[in-house]
Amino acid sequence: MPMNVRSAKDFFRPLALGAPEPLREIPARPSRAIHFFDPSNEKMAAKIPQLVGTVDVLLGNLEDAVKADRKEAARAGLVAIAQATADLGGQGASTQLWTRVNALDSPWVLDDLTTLVSAVGDKLDVVMVPKVEGAEDIAYVDRLLAQLEARAGLTKPLLVHAILETARGMTNVEEICGASPRMQGLSLGPADLAASRRMKTTRVGGGHPGYVVRQDARKTSDGVDVEAPRATYQQDLWHYTIARMVDACAAHGIYPYYGPFGDIADVVACEDQFRNAYLLGCVGAWSLHPAQIEIAQRVFSPSVEDIAHARRVVAALQENGGDGTGAVMLDGKMEDDASLKQCLVLVELAEQLAARDPALAQLYAGAGA
Ligand code: GLV
Ligand code: MG
């Protein structure tokens, strides 16, 4: 265990007298779409009550995209929205309430945390912290939240979500995930991360047409013809990052998310990027526009076909002795204990989603074994 992590015996002790006990397990609440809104924008704020119940997570954004002279209005707006909106945030609410606070080196973050925890700590589910560089950033937030929770008399601990968006944060990704029992998950922050790494894309997430591999050149009698047309295949700029993030999160029992996809009009490429993240193990993505809510909630829900197949595999292995051991052939394919576990990932996700989404419950109910 690294020296800067508390002993396993103390790991779950509250960090302030009177703060709630940390959770031993991070609840698997559906969070397929984390819909960002600017609480200082009155037009956007007015639409929030209509979104409750239609989106898994609403996130009041206080950081980037909110102008410096609107930071205080955004903070106050979020408090007002949280207080006034029924069924938004807190245990059992149909839509979770998250916030993204300002960066830890900014002049606003101390007031962000102090105000929000004191005023609406019982409604906030998750605090997203941007530009996290290492375990020391999480330790700071962890202790401060415990102090604020104790002062506010909260009974449920706030969870923390880190954005992976600096090269240093990336190199410390495992220690960030394990830094506190509050750690709920990680999101990829492709814009800040690209800048921090000096990548040469200026897009907010998504692919780049220059990042390709090319078919071999055709051989000719005097060598190779490099000028003749050849197929190229665009590669995913974010594959390595997401795969590392997924491993770090899974190893620590927390959840990975794709972050923002900035090209709002390109709903097709957005869907591709979200689906790649889903297939690699992510549980959700950010939505920057109402159009992206539907994409994320559809893509991060298993298809009816996948659930029907997964249930057939589970049933076939149960019939084969009931304890999941051994192997069976199904449609010419070998299924064993490992493929049973793969199928259970999908079946359990479908159950969690069905419990909150009646339309999905109906769809999955028809996906028979
Ligand atoms: C998100 O915050 C990003 O930097 O991409
Ligand atoms: Mg960012």
Image (cartoon, rainbow, N blue to C red):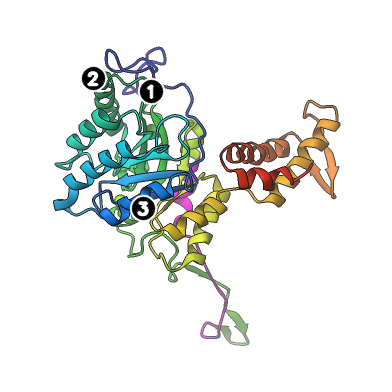
Q: Residues within 10 Å of mark 3 (few under 14, many from 20)?
A: few
Q: Secondary structure at mark 3?
A: helix
Where residue 28 appears, as percent x and y from the top left, is 52, 33
**Residue position marked by numbered label 1 in the rendering:** 156
**In-image side of 144 versus 248 (left or right):** left
Q: Residues within 10 Å of mark 2 (few under 14, many from 20)?
A: some
Find the distance from the CA under tag 3 to the CA under tag 1: 28 Å
Q: Earlier in the sequence, mark 1 or mark 2?
A: 2
**In-image side of 225 versus 143 (left or right):** right
**Residue position marked by numbered label 2 in the rendering:** 151
Based on the picture, tell me whether residue 242 belongs to the magenta stretch.
yes
Where residue 89 appears, as percent x and y from the top left, is 39, 35
Amino acid residing under circle 1 = Lys
The label on residue 47 is 3
Where does the magenta region start and end?
225-246
Amino acid residing under circle 3 = Lys
Camera-side mark, 2 or 3: 3
Camera-side mark, 3 or 1: 3
Find the distance from the CA under tag 2 to the CA under tag 3: 32 Å
- Quarter where residue 194 is shown: bottom left
- Quarter where residue 313 is shown: top right
Amino acid residing under circle 2 = Arg
Do residues under tags 3 and 1 come within 8 Å of each other at their CB atoms?
A: no
Determine whether the beta carbon of the residue marked 3 sits less than 8 angstroms from the nearest atom of ligand 1: no
